[in-house]
Image (cartoon, rainbow, N blue to C red):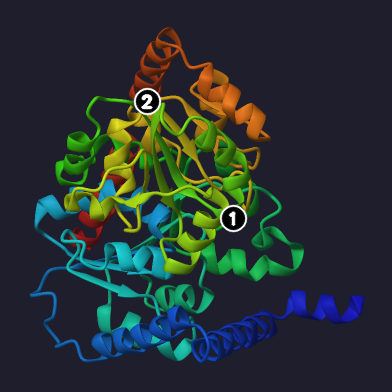
Amino acid sequence: MVVAFEKIRRNYREILLIYSIIISLLSLVLRLGGLFIPKFKKWNKDRTQHLKIVKDLPPNFSHSRPVIWFHCASLGEFEQARSIIEKLYDQKKHFLFLTLFSPSGYEVRKNYQKADLVLYLPIDTRKNMALIVNKIMPILFVGVKYDFWWHLFECLNKHQIPKFFIAMKMDENHYVFNRFAKKYLEILGENASFFCQDQATSTLLLNKISNAKTIKTVGDPRVDSVVERKVNAETLAPLIQANIPPKKVIIYGSIYVECMDIITPFIQKYEHDYLHILVPHDVSKGNISDIAKKLSKPFIFLNEMNKGLTSNIIMVNEIGKLFDLYTLAEIVYIGGGFTKNLHNTLEPARFGVPIIIGPKHRGFEEVDAFLELGIAIEVKNAAEFTQAVLSQSLEKRADIKIKSGEYFTENDQASYKIFSEISGQLHLKKRL
């Protein structure tokens, strides 16, 4: 067994063969899933159609503008790239191509107006990636965090297309740092620049990747995206009209069924003292039904409030509304801390409100900062949740608002630093 693994470690092609087998199995699982799961069926169909869209692009599809390709795994990664994309969009000099891997990201951003073309990334086979790279032929590829697709990177390297990886935050447990994955690091580092959220990631990459062009610590570009993002007042209008006389508003953002055991006792006891707005991570009918069973209280949907219905418990069954709702909140609970991992805390922090979270938040630098500053409060059960809500006095909320403002002032500019590096790369390419 040891001899076999050593052979794999030495043989570059064998490693990629194993990867190709894994990708083939992933594709098979998705196709089989499409036979039983409507979400998978649509995902498969859309990816097939999108690959055909690329194949059928006319020779001058970009109207002679150089193409910059951004790839994001999902919605959270898109938010880390948003500010940079929009700075490039304002220049009107480049064709901006955006791909996403997950349906949760694509379905929200498929009509994003500041990218020229938004598609799913196809399954990472050599054939698919050769087609897309040869057709698009970007002058720069920008990947967000660590959505690593090795056949894609091989194709980019073959054409000497520079790779920028932004918002990097990794630890030594990532599989690419395994001794058997040494060749992956060579593929990753070739003609690549890395812009990291923290110094620990920069130091790790400097020690592990010998052929990278640039490795810098610049911070998290999501901070700029959150600061620059505008609130859509149309989302808020029915709530403002209905909340008369005004009550304190609690937003339960990106919640899972597992969150309900923590928040339901409070909602049931204090139903009439607060306006409770629940925003599930998954807004499908089945998931909302599961949440409703746990809630055991009548509620109304946000998009039905124009019918004159009123309630102190409001359920949001549409994606893309959560950020706007934070502007009404006096307290926010963020889901995910009792499942796999915590959801975005930067967005509510921008509005200077107390944030209550579960214990699973490893790897988020901003969460560590928010806990230290007292902006966030970690709870482990329903009793602690109730205590956290009831302990938020006017004085505490005022202090949190000040500290949140100071945090954003101290941690912005990451997107500007990355944009400056991209501009320098583009200027160099133009000269060459």
Residue 282 placement (x, y as % from top left): 45, 60
C-alpha span from label 1 to label 2: 48 Å
Looking at marks 1 and 2 on the same chain, the residue that comes earlier in the sequence is marked by: 1
Residue 381 shown left or right of residue 365 in the figure: right
Q: Residue at x 32, y 68 (%)?
A: 107
Image height check: is 232 above or below 375?
below
Residue 147 placement (x, y as % from top left): 50, 63
Residue 379 placement (x, y as % from top left): 63, 31
| Callout 2 crowding tier (Cα within 10 Å): few <14, some 14–19, many ≥20 | many
Give 400 or 367, whichever is nearer the viewer.
Answer: 400
The residue most toward the top is 395
Q: Secondary structure at mark 1?
A: loop
- Which disc number belongs to residue 330? 2
- Which disc number belongs to residue 417? none
Mark 2: amino acid:
Glu
Q: Residue at x 67, y 35 (%)?
A: 381
Q: Secondary structure at mark 2?
A: loop
- Which disc number belongs to residue 210? 1
Mark 1: amino acid:
Ser
Image height check: is 266 above or below 281?
above
Count every numbered label the image shows and give the total.
Answer: 2
